[in-house]
Amino acid sequence: MDSIGSSLNRWMDKDWKERMARLEKEVFAYPGVIDFKRRHPHIPAEEYEKNKAALFEYKRERSNCDACPGLENCPNLMQGYQPELMEDKGKVTVAYHRCSLKVHDDEKKKRQALIKSYYIPKEILHASFDQVDMDHESRAKAGTAALHFASTTVPGEDGQGLYLYGKFGVGKTYIAGAIMNELAERSIGSMIVHVPDFFREIKESLSDNTVREKVDSVKGVPVLILDDLGAESMSAWTRDDILGVILQYRMMEKLPTVYTSNYDYSELEEHLTYSQKGGNERLKAKRIMERIRPFTEEVFMDGQNRRG
């Protein structure tokens, strides 16, 4: 009489063979396998037998794609990659390539990597020209000028930027954010910097000797957006050794700069004239303006205060 162990082994062996036969039948009936065999009639049947493991892998992974649960929940061994049957010197192999969802996600991350910011609200980083309200003539003019700039600027060849000014809350920073995203679509890197907070950080960096590092990280970006220029407490040092150095470098390298401000050109020059210590340095203010006025288009923005 057979032992329980040997009977169990025979049962398991029979069950395993049946399952394998069923899986093999499903694999060779899978549309992708059928189509591959139709397109490669010269591959002999024994090659498919030798490479059944590759066919099993293809069918399993491709079935996941057929019932795609989305990129985040992709169950494939390589998330976001689709299998494809390939011929390699008469042998059947499996290769992987990115699915459309993975391609789209990678492109999105690539664009986001082109956008950097200092102290800017998250919603600004997702701004779009499609969402800019054209409910005021000056807003429409500003949006048109900004879109034209973002669509045509060539950093390193054309250093002309944009100067958006107007009262509080009319959407200057939002349009600046839309510029960034339009530039990213063109694979042009940009950085938006909230000037008052940036200058405050620069002053604090004197203690750890990182001033030069931070200035260098800003001055060389393809397109720099200086947000809320004029709202800072200006000192002679931040004006001449920080702002002046950044703008001089960008002028020499033909790198465009976009500004948002509550001041027009004349009011900004007046603001730059006076330092925290009460000094009147009109010549130095004019020197800064010579790095701004000739290299930007001044555009006024008016309208309802959106922050209210």
Image: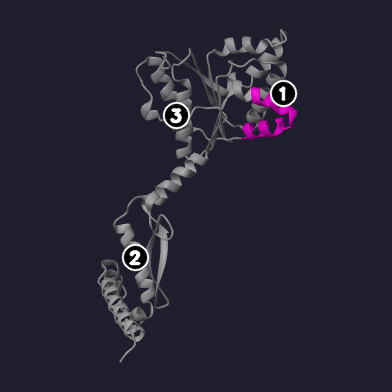
Q: Nearer the viewer, residue 280 or 256?
A: 280
Q: In the rendered structure, does residue 29 fall within the stretch colored magenta? A: no
User: How far apart are the alpha carbons under marks 1 and 3?
Assistant: 32 Å
Q: Which residue is mark 1?
A: 241
Answer with the quarter of the image where residue 218 lies: top right
Residue depicted at x 41% and y 30%: 128
Secondary structure type for disc 1? helix
Please tell me which of labels 1 and 3 falls first in the chain.
Answer: 3
Pick the front one: 306 or 12: 12
In the structure shown, which secondary structural element does the residue marked by tag 3 occupy? Answer: helix
Query: Which region shows up in magenta?
Result: 200-220
Quarter the C terminus occupies: top left
Magenta stretch holds residue 214: yes
Callout 2–callout 3 Cβ contact below 8 Å: no
Q: Is residue 96 above or below residue 54?
A: above
Nearer to us: label 1 or label 3: 3
The answer for how far apart the CA atoms under marks 2 and 1 are is 63 Å
Q: Nearer the viewer, residue 254 or 203?
A: 203
Where does the image place residue 101, in percent across and percent down from the top left? 37, 50
Relative image position of residue 106 (x, y in whole percent): 45, 48
- Mark 2 touches mark 1? (CB < 8 Å): no
Q: What is the count of numbered marks?
A: 3
Report the magenta stretch's main SS: helix
Residue in the image at 70% along x and 28% along y: 205
- Residue 227 sits above or below residue 214 on the image: above
Q: Is residue 16 left or right of residue 184?
A: left
x, y percentage for residue 195? 59, 22
Q: Amino acid at mark 2?
A: Arg
Residue identifier under label 2: 60
